[in-house]
Amino acid sequence: MLDPEFFDDQEYYVQRFTFAGARATGWPEGGLRVCGAPRYRAGLRISTDGVGGALLTWWDERAFGSDIYASRVVPEGALAPGWAVDGVRVSDPAGAYEFYPDIAPDGAGGAYLVWRREAVDFPNFVQHLTAGGGVAPGWPAYGVRLMATSQGQYDPRIASDGRGGAIVAWDEQLSRRGIWAQRFVMDGVVAVQVSLVSAAAQPDRVRLVWHVADALSFQATVERRGEIGDVRRLGEVTADGTGRIEYEDRDVVPGERYAYRLAYSEEGIERRTAETWAEVPRALALTLEGLRPNPAVRDLNVSFTLPNGAPARLELLDASGRRVIEREVGSLEAGRHLFRLGEGVGIAPGIYWLRLTQAGRSLLARGAVIR
């Protein structure tokens, strides 16, 4: 792992080796570049992602002050889909000086991170990212402050709890003395129940639907970013009487990928939902990408594309071929869709097959469910 701490414009590379000490098949000879942004960076930490790849985090001075960045590499030797080139910024850019990150897997391809902010009371922060590099549902945009009533938190470290959560440990030297630990679970601190219902992409548009529990007073701003560039605010949305929120983005380019999220205020605190990535197709064809993420931990979100609005069926089959769930999806019409298949259905951990059928043609994809 390259981590030169004494030169400007440093780059980070990662390489995978086999048990016999040889470079793994498919990996670049000189290693995969994880970060090539300008200026100084340090504090590199690496962890398995729990599904064959790797998670990395570091603090970075590419902008004013220092920020925490993270990246994920898949087993084949490439950046994981959804993770920004040169890393995803995890910390609040208004925090000025963020240092000493650590990272651990959530068991489903995502990551838990902890880091320290250089401020009067030296607080630590914890964040949960999904397998696609977005903020996990229920977690604030820039993480949760660790033990807000304490001061002087030093040397934070984090490890997986083996059950989808993480345990953080730190040293306190001001308000309380000693080594302390805290456990975090997948949902973190849940503010309001905002969940993605569907995301559909056509060559000329992306259509998103969310559901919110507080249907009477919920208002939000739709935000979007590409794989390169800053976040852009698209427009204001409100929930209808049933809690449904719909938004259609027609300012898209075929072949591009966009991440969408909702920004809203709760009790004076600005919060954001997890990002949802949508790839705008150049042309439509029947495709079945499978579970996103895979393995799935709770929700069965399936990614697929329909070339038209003809009747179509999506099924979940167990390893023996028994149908567990069946849904008609032709009413979603043409486009690329992210569809929640297992709404209200308890799915046991195991290996499953997904089958998408339309106009006499069937596609299969394999997926796993873990707990």
Image (cartoon, grey):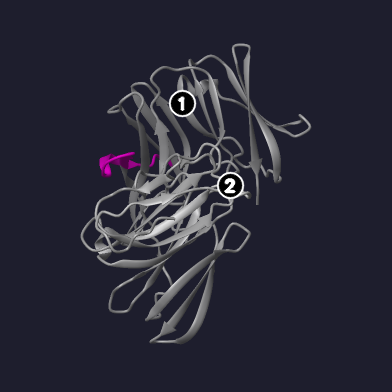
Residue 340: x and y in percent read 55, 37
Residue 238: x and y in percent read 34, 42
Query: Which portion, as a residue range, is magenta?
Result: 223-244
> Relative to 343, is 93 on the left or the right?
left
For label 1, the crowd category at 10 Å Cα-Cα, with few meaning under 14, some 14 to 19 and many 20 or more, is: many
> In the figure, 101 relative to 17: above or below?
below
Q: Residue furthest left?
A: 64
Give the labeled residue for mark 1: 336
**Amino acid under disc 1:** Arg
Residue 158: x and y in percent read 51, 67
Residue 360: x and y in percent read 63, 11
The circle drawn on residue 237 is none
What residue sits 50% from the left and 82% below the top? 179
> Relative to 93, is 27 on the left or the right?
right
The number of discs equals 2
> In the figure, 2 relative to 151: above or below?
above
> In the figure, 173 relative to 292: above or below?
below
Most foreground residue, 339 or 156: 156
**Quarter where residue 209 is shown:** top left
What residue sits 34% from the left and 62% below the top? 42
Give the labeled residue for mark 2: 52
Most foreground residue, 221 or 170: 170
- Inspect the magenta stretch and tell me whether residue 241 lies in it: yes
